[in-house]
Amino acid sequence: MHYGIGIKDMPENMRPREKFLARGESCLNDAELLAIILGHGTKNMSAIDLAQLLLVKYKGIRGLKEVSLEELVQEKGIGMAKAVSIKAAVELGRRVGLDIQTRATIRSPEDVKNIVMEEMRYFDREHFRVMYLDRKGGLLAMEDISVGGLHSSIAHSREVFKNAIKKSANSVILIHNHPSGDVTPSREDIEVTKRLLEAGKIIGIEVLDHIIIGESSYCSLKSKALI
């Protein structure tokens, strides 16, 4: 007979709730945070073990966003209440990423990352998004231009700049995600950026940067001197 080690059997400084209270949520890994949401595991599996099992099976938080409620309740130790709690927590995280202040000012690639990272890092397909800015760097709007396959997205100059003209934007920042998590710019990424740079020069709307979002990092093509 197998007996798992429960959370109560762990030293206090290793228990997720105690770590949270003592050191804050940022000190917990994904499995520990998920274990708090789960509350408890099964007879032979602690909440942390169950959380790790789910994260491995669904390839991280991104996978838990995509998995259906019906699929989750089929997992041993996951009833409807736990499944709903997981989906609600992931949705809250997504909404936090979308909750940007009106007319936020964009001064650096870090500002862009802070606004889009928590949502875009979990996409399982490439999304091409554009930020439209005023003369002082104020964010006028942010819109998705296209959704591509797993490895490429399609960015049409007419769609990017049609919206820029409508919004009287002074400049734009291009953004897209790499579902693989690797933020290394591809040859296509660089070529698309240069094409849009040239189009922007013709109509007088500057392309300030192109930001690539990965699972836990980002890349600014301008900072890398690739544009």
Image (cartoon, rainbow, N blue to C red):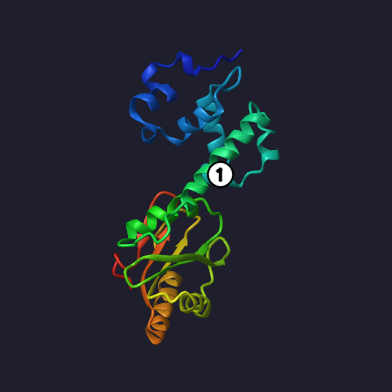
Q: Residue at coordinates 56% horizontally, 54% vertically from top-left?
A: 124
SS for dot 1: helix
Please identify the quarter of the rendering in which residue 198 is found: bottom left
Taking depth in this image into account, of 19 and 161 the one nearest to the observer is: 161
Q: Residue at coordinates 68% horizontally, 33% vertically from top-left?
A: 73
Task: Name above or below for residue 146 compared with residue 41.
Answer: below
Task: Tell me residue 122's x, y (percent).
Answer: 51, 50
Task: Tell me residue 113's x, y (percent).
Answer: 38, 56
Taking depth in this image into account, of 37 and 132 the one nearest to the observer is: 132
Please identify the quarter of the rendering in which residue 87 is found: top right
Task: Tell me residue 173's x, y (percent).
Answer: 40, 68
Q: Residue at coordinates 65% horizontally, 28% vertically from top-left?
A: 76
Query: How many labels, in total?
Result: 1
Say whether residue 178 is left or right of residue 11.
Answer: right
What amino acid is labelled 1 in the image? Glu
Task: Name above or below for residue 55 compared with residue 96.
Answer: above
Q: As drawn, which residue projects farthest toward the bottom?
A: 202
Q: Quadrant of the N terminus?
A: top right
The residue indicated by pointer 1 is: 91
Task: Name above or below for residue 201 compared with residue 188.
Answer: below
Q: Quadrant of the C terminus?
A: bottom left
Taking depth in this image into account, of 7 and 38 the one nearest to the observer is: 38
- Tell me if mark 1 has few (under 14), some (14-19) or many (20+) residues whose alpha carbon lies within 10 angstroms of its own: some
